[in-house]
Amino acid sequence: MAPCLFFRKTRISGDWLVLGLGNPGPEYEQTRHNAGFAVADRLAPRLGVRRWRPAFSALVGEGRADGVSAAVAKPQTFMNESGRAASALAEHMGLSGDRILVVHDDVDLPFGRIRLKRKGGDGGHNGLRSIIKWLGHGRFPRLRMGIGRPKPGETMTGHVLSPFDDYELQAAEALWDLGAEAVRTVLLQGMDEAMNRFNNIQVQNRDA
């Protein structure tokens, strides 16, 4: 169990809350399940986030771009309890569901694809299931980061908790950057523009 990172005197504000999902700890850093953390790390400098601080069971950075402010958070409760941070931050910031954007890995999308959705169910994703449980609804936008299905003979757990191989890593880095730009577009230009620009892009290795 991760340590409680809730501090009552901490003040977090913003027009948006962006939650990048993943598991804390160095052993999970390069795994497919940490796609949300990877996108959050690349989004932070695009919003001028200068530091991460522990608050509300997450690491949180606050930033701004073109007059729009956002808190970017990486829950530290492990994936299955992501909703604890989501609920606490949303309540603290006074944000409704349409201003909470969740970034997560998705095995039902081919590796290299991203897809924005306005709302939905959990799709079998434990992090989304927890957030829906804690918020009481699924009416929040999400960015699905395609990591593809397991290979023959590979378990689902083994797949999502495995790191990218050397060949895949190049495309993965490009995918995280694309995801960060998609989130920034949502914040500054809205979901319609972002969906039109990013929902049909396929990232590939340069030497593919």
Image (tube, rainbow, N blue to C red):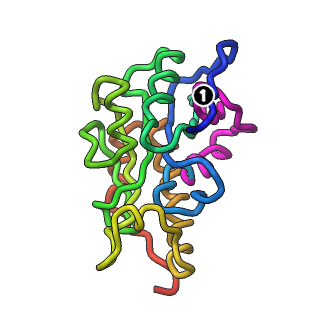
The quadrant in which the C terminus is found is bottom left
Relative depth, front residue between 124 and 67: 124
The quadrant in which the N terminus is found is top right
- Rendering quarter of residue 170: bottom right
Identity of the residue drawn at 58% across and 63% down:
30
Relative depth, front residue between 95 and 88: 88
Residue bearing the label numbered 1 = 67
Identity of the residue drawn at 53% across and 77% down:
165
Residue 110: x, y in percent? 33, 67
Identity of the residue drawn at 57% across and 57% down:
28
Please, is residue 206 above or below residue 116 in the view? below
Q: Is residue 6 part of the magenta span, yes or no?
A: no
Please, is residue 200 above or below residue 18 in the view? below
- Residue located farthest toward the bottom when viewing the structure as drawn: 207
- Rendering quarter of residue 103: top left
Q: How many marks?
A: 1
Residue 108 appears left or right of 22: left
Relative depth, front residue between 199 and 165: 165
Q: Is residue 51 part of the magenta span, yes or no?
A: yes
Identity of the residue drawn at 42% across and 41% down:
80
- Rendering quarter of residue 149: bottom left
- Residue located farthest toward the front when viewing the structure as drawn: 1
Residue 153: x, y in percent? 31, 78
Tell me the crowding category of disc 1: few under 14, some 14 to 19, or many 20 or more residues within 10 angstroms, Cα based.
Answer: few
Residue 83 appears left or right of 192: right
Residue 23: x, y in percent? 53, 48
Please, is residue 26 above or below residue 168 in the view? above
Amino acid at the residue labelled 1: Gly
Q: Which residues are drawn in magenta?
A: 38-67
The local secondary structure at tag 1 comes to loop
Residue 43: x, y in percent? 59, 47
